[in-house]
Amino acid sequence: MHLKIPRLYDSHTHFIATGEFSSGLSLHGIRSENDLQNLQVTSASFRSDWILGFGWDKDVLSFSIHKKVLDKYFPDAPVFFMRKDGHSSWLNSLALEKLGIESESGVLIETEHLKAWDSLPAYTSDQQRLHILKACSVYNKAGFTHVRDMSCTKDLWQRLHMMSLAEELTVAIEQNYTTHEISDFHSVLENACESKKQETATLRLKGIKLFYDGTLGSETALLSHPYRNIANGNQGMRLWSREDLATVIVETWQKGLEFSVHVIGDQAAHEVVSVAREVSAKGAVGRLNLEHAQILRPETIQMMKPLHVTCYMQPCHWLSDRAWLQEKIGDLYKYAFPMEALRVAKIPTFFGCDSPIEASSFWSNFDALEMSAKEGIRKLNDDIGKYHSHPDVSFADSFTVFENREVKEIVFCGKEIKI
């Protein structure tokens, strides 16, 4: 198969984490305490004096996760181990003490987890540079020349800005700053506005992003009815109030920036679109980006039509979720991964991979579309290449050539990239 795609685009990713976790401590193979004891901790596993790891999966562990387990094997250093979905973390007692957090189990979820992550000591400048170059290499090896990052910080922007001016970046990057609660929103918005003034040929600032709900794997994505496999009636988590959400939308749009929001559950998406409709009716105008949009009811899609909405989806998540997805969400499965419904409704949609949660891979999304159509997901009647091509030809125009799924050629801003 020969395929040439202009501006091959991973439209939802976590840029610096991709570089960091690609070279750091992997927890994907942990099954037993013995595996934990035998982890190979190297200098690349450290962030200052903290040991960081990524990729543990509660569903495959033969032991219960608890801070005492980490205390046993890592008594002398603070430990921060992130779950594979990026929405919870497992800390030892020393780490909790340093962060000033009280936790009986040592497991933090959603907003508490994200705030703890943001409180970790900074990497050195040399480490940041290495992570950026590693991330560029990861995306290029997968064929990507354009990425849309959902995890910008002021420090990351400054480093990327310098490297962009020096023509050291081999991907064109769109950045979004993340706010975790209303108390930090205005400082985040100020940083985003300052960054907007410093755009380059390969670096752009798009807007503000927040998490409105969690994930299906953790049963924290907000659904319109309880998860089928849980007896307590849990419907997930709502991480922002309606009033604070409206404030963020309006003030972000007033600054001419895009507003992006993580919504995986159908009820999360419905509530966000409802608030956007309300503020729009009062005169607020701007772009609304729904990140993941993994379950959308038909009435929610209809409500999107008067708004300037774009959906950024990751079909590859179906490959990871397929084993339990129908069991968890029941009859909502018919609204899961609604790529075709969005196409019919003429809602602009782009595909990404959510790296490092999933590997950055055009072909994972390709396979997910093919396989999911055989298991009850409505088939996308369109060319996947459109959904993975950055729409702006003026933004670092480039192309990628695949031969039999292997990257054969990448030309970025007129220069061939060696991979």
Image (spheres, helix red, strand yellow):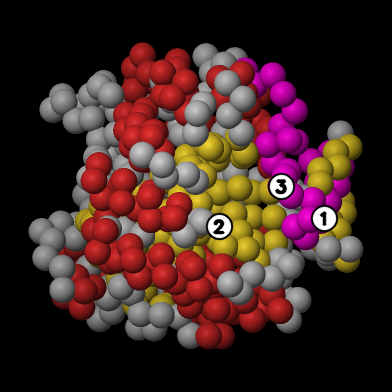
Looking at marks 3 and 1 on the same chain, the residue that comes earlier in the sequence is marked by: 3
Q: Which amino acid does label 3 sit on?
A: His
Instruction: Identify whether 341 is placed above or below 220.
Output: above
In front here: 127 or 241?
241
Residue at screen point 62% across, 39% down: 350
> Is label 2 in a helix, a strand or a loop?
strand
Q: What residue type is labelled 2?
A: Lys
Looking at marks 1 and 2 on the same chain, the residue that comes earlier in the sequence is marked by: 2
> Is label 1 in a helix, a strand or a loop?
strand
Residue at screen point 61% across, 25% down: 346
Q: Mark 3 sits on what residue?
A: 390
Give the label on residue 206, or none: 2
Looking at marks 2 and 3 on the same chain, the residue that comes earlier in the sequence is marked by: 2
Question: For the residues marked 2 and 3, what is the alpha-carbon distance in whole angstroms?
Answer: 14 Å
Q: Which amino acid does label 1 sit on?
A: Ser
Instruction: Identify whether 61 is placed above or below 78.
Output: above
Residue 155, how many percent across, how many down? Answer: 48, 77
